[in-house]
Image: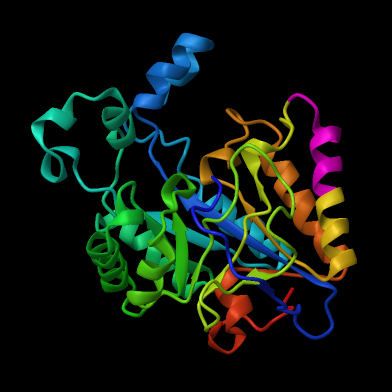
Amino acid sequence: MEPPIEPAAPTRTAAPDGYEFALCLTHDVDRPYKTYQALYAALSGNPLYHLSSLRPGVEPYWQFEEIMELESELGVRSAFYFLNEPSLFASQGPREWIRPANLLEHAGRYDPTDDAIASVIRGLDEGGWEVGLHGSFHSATDRDRLAEEKETLESILGHEVNGGRQHHLKLSDGTWEHHRDIGLRYDASLGSSSSVGFTHGYDLVRPFDDEFVVFPLTAMEVALPDPGDDFESARSVCADLVDEAAENGAVMTALWHPRYFNEREFPGYRRLYRWMVEYALDSRGWVGSPGELLDPAESPRPLGTE
C-alpha cells in the first residue's frame, strides 16, 4: 500500500565493497499451515489434492527446510518475518467476531511459541538467517501490541531483532515511529502487492533523518507475471529489475511468501526465485537479508560467502 506520509529523501546506502548493488531477500511467514485455504481452493479445482492437505502430517505450506536448502546451495541468506496474530476472541469484542474480514484474517493463525515453530525460528537464527517481526493486523496503530510481539519473538531467540514488515504492508502515520520507539532498526513495509519497481527510489529511506531506515519493497511474488503460466515473462520482469538495480547501485528488496515454494500448488515460483538470485549474483550483486546489509559485523555469514 502507499505510505500514509511522504518519506524523507532517500539516503545513499552503497552496496558492500566489490558489489554493484544489493538484493535483499525476505519471506513473510503468514500461514505455515494450510487449513481453511484448502476448502476454498478445492472449490476452484483439484479438490482431491487440496482436501488431502488437511490430513495429519501433510503440510504443503511448511517450506522452511526447502528454502534453507535452496539458499544454502546458492550461498545466500534471507530474512523470515514471523507473525504473532492474537486470538480474535481474546483481542476483539463480540461484535467483531462475526465480521467476515476478521474471521478470514484470523483463520489459520499460528503461535510462534509452539514447539515446532519455535524450533524453526531458532534453527534459522543459528544457521545465519535473519529472524524478524511481521507486525500483526492491528499493530500498525498499536505500539504496545507491536512491542509485545517483539518481546515474544526475542524470548524465543534469546536476543533482539533488528526489523521486520507489517502484515499486508499496513502503514499509518505513526507506524514507523512505533517501530523506532520499540527498538527496531528498520521497516520493510513500504511497497505494493500489485505492482513492482523502484517506486520509492533506489536507496534506503530515513524518515526521521536518524539511524532508523526503511527498505522499500521492489517486488512481491504475486505482483509478477505468474511463472506457472508464462515463465519467460516473469523471468524477463525480474531480469529488468535486477538490471535496473545494477545500473543505479540500488538496494532491491524481494518478498517471496514461503507457501510459494510449494511447486505442486504454485508452479514456477521456486524456479523463478532461484533464477533471480543466481542472476543477481552473476550481475555482481550482493545478496542477503536486510539486517545483514545494515550490520554485516553481526552476521555469522561473512559478506559474499558462497
What residue is at 59 percent from the left and 64 percent from the top? 78
Image quarter hosting the N terminus? top right
Residue extending farthest bottom: 297
Residue 240 on image: x %, y % = 86, 49
Return the residue nearer the eye: 161 or 183.
183
Return the residue nearer the eye: 30 or 294.
294
Residue 151 appears anywhere in the view: yes
Residue 270, quarter of the rendered image: top right
Image quarter hosting the C terminus? bottom right
What residue is at 26 percent from the left and 72 percent from the top? 155
Magenta stretch secondary structure, dominant = helix
Residue 93, quarter of the rendered image: top left
Q: Is residue 234 magenta?
A: yes
Above or below, 183 relative to 148 = below
Return the residue nearer the eye: 163 or 227.
163
Looking at the image, residue 244 sits to the left or right of residue 204; the answer is right
Residue 278, quarter of the rendered image: bottom right
Residue 194 on image: x %, y % = 63, 37
What residue is at 80 percent from the left and 33 percent from the top? 231
Q: Is residue 39 magenta?
A: no
What residue is at 82 percent from the left and 42 percent from the top? 237
Looking at the image, residue 173 sits to the left or right of residue 93; the answer is right
Residue 124 appears anywhere in the view: no
Return the residue nearer the eye: 147 or 305.
147
Above or below, 55 relative to 280 = above
Please state the extent of the stretch shown in magenta in the rendering: 229-239
Residue 83 on image: x %, y % = 36, 53
